[in-house]
């Protein structure tokens, strides 16, 4: 039986309400800055996950998703840590997309051969067989199986990652919101390189790239991690883990690239008193941070803060930047030239952050991590 049509005025009224709801929803999401987080999210807590939480806590930011490559740990273990973090933070609507398990070319065995030729690396992420004896590190024991997910002291997640790969999600999302999506990358750039090769327009369709990585001439800090660059000032882990991916990404046609290298992070440290302060915060994850947080330089937090509030930057410069992919002593090192002085092989101008207002940055970080979760 065919039901009679609703009166025309009622249909028009319903249509107008639907259109108004759609416009309001579009304006609400449009008012917030859209971002994809590409992060080697090893945990629990850590600079990686604290940076994710800062973006989730920013009321003017819409986190479209999180993509995870191997780096500090293996991808699947990092995915598990991220999912558990989202449960604790009450943000399970944010999708997590598994990315690259291995670098494009680099391998653990190639790294061992390199070390035989040029000396030991201080830190190798997922390939670190013997962790430096700093006395502050809690992490699962070394394992060579990239698909093993050891039990986490923070608990196991009940939610699952997306079945869509990181590269596919990156491409699909920048095409859905052309010119609107910022990519904040704070680990190896493998996922972004794969997305660039999957779709040559990927980078040009994004709003901008902000990445944490690389090193120029940092002033060595008073912590063990300074050994990573004390005698090799152009070396940094994120670029060294997958130099080929980093070089590919830095040659892509981004509208804007901002780099937060090691240099401005050496004056930062997530002090133990910061975690004690967070223990009295109002965010649902503050007890988690107080329990599992460790005093490291605020590498990834700084990259996020620079994007959230560029006014904290006190010194910067524009350079042409690349990464050394020759299998020599400089493999993975940061290469740079003044604008107009590069070799002319497609180098892109990069805004390099050299120093920041550290007290302002610290206050900003603690405020974001201790405030109640914003409506989303």
Image (cartoon, rainbow, N blue to C red):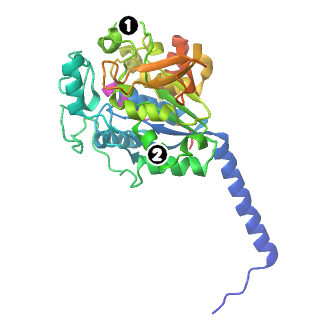
Helix, strand or loop for the magenta stretch, by majority: helix
Q: Earlier in the sequence, mark 2 or mark 1?
A: 2
Residue 207 versus residue 280: which sits nearer the camera?
207
Point out residue 372 in the picture as x, y percentages from the top left corner: 51, 33
In the image, the segment drawn in magenta is: 284-293
The N terminus is located in which quarter?
bottom right
Decide whether residue 56 is among the magenta residues. Answer: no
Tell which residue pokes out farthest to the bottom in this image: 1
Q: CA distance from mark 2 to mark 1?
A: 37 Å
Q: Which residue is mark 1?
A: 220
Which residue lies under the disc numbered 2? Answer: 197
Outermost right residue:
9
Residue 339, position in %: x, y?
Answer: 60, 19
Determine the residue positioned at 42% across, 12% down: 266
Quadrant of residue 21 within the rendered picture: bottom right
The 10 Å Cα crowd at callout 1, few under 14, some 14 to 19, many 20 or more, is some
Secondary-structure class at tag 1: loop
Which SS class for mark 2? Answer: helix
């Amino acid at each position: 039986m065919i039901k009679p049509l609703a009166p025309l005025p009622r249909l028009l009224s319903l249509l107008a309400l639907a259109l108004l709801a759609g416009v309001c929803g579009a304006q609400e999401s449009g008012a917030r800055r859209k971002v994809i987080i590409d992060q080697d999210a090893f945990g629990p807590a850590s600079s990686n996950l604290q940076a994710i939480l800062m973006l989730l806590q920013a009321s003017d930011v819409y986190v479209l998703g999180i993509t995870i490559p191997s780096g500090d740990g293996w991808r699947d273990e990092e995915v598990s840590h991220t999912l558990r973090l989202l449960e604790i933070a009450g943000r399970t609507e944010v999708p997590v997309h598994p990315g690259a398990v291995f670098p494009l070319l680099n391998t653990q065995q190639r790294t061992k051969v390199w070390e035989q030729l040029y000396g030991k690396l201080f830190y190798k992420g997922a390939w670190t067989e013997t962790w430096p004896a700093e006395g502050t590190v809690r992490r699962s024991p070394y394992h060579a199986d990239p698909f093993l997910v050891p039990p986490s002291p923070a608990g196991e997640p009940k939610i699952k990652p997306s079945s869509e790969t990181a590269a596919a999600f990156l491409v699909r999302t920048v095409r859905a919101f052309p010119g609107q999506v910022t990519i904040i990358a704070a680990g190896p750039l493998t996922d972004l390189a794969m997305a660039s090769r999957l779709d040559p327009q990927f980078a040009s369709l994004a709003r901008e790239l902000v990445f944490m990585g690389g090193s120029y001439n940092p002033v060595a800090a008073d912590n063990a991690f300074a050994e990573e660059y004390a005698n090799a000032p152009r070396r940094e882990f994120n670029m060294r883990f997958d130099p080929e991916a980093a070089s590919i990404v830095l040659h892509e046609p981004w509208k804007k690239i901002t780099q937060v290298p090691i240099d401005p992070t050496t004056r930062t440290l997530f002090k133990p008193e910061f975690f004690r302060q967070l223990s009295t915060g109002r965010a649902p994850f503050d007890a988690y941070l107080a329990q599992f947080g460790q005093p490291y330089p605020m590498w990834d937090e700084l990259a996020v803060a620079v994007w959230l509030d560029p006014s904290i930057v006190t010194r910067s410069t524009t350079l042409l930047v690349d990464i050394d992919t020759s299998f020599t002593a400089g493999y993975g090192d940061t290469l740079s030239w003044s604008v107009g002085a590069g070799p002319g092989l497609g180098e892109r101008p990069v805004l390099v952050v050299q120093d920041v207002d550290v007290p302002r940055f610290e206050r900003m970080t603690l405020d974001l991590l201790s405030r109640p979760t914003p409506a989303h």
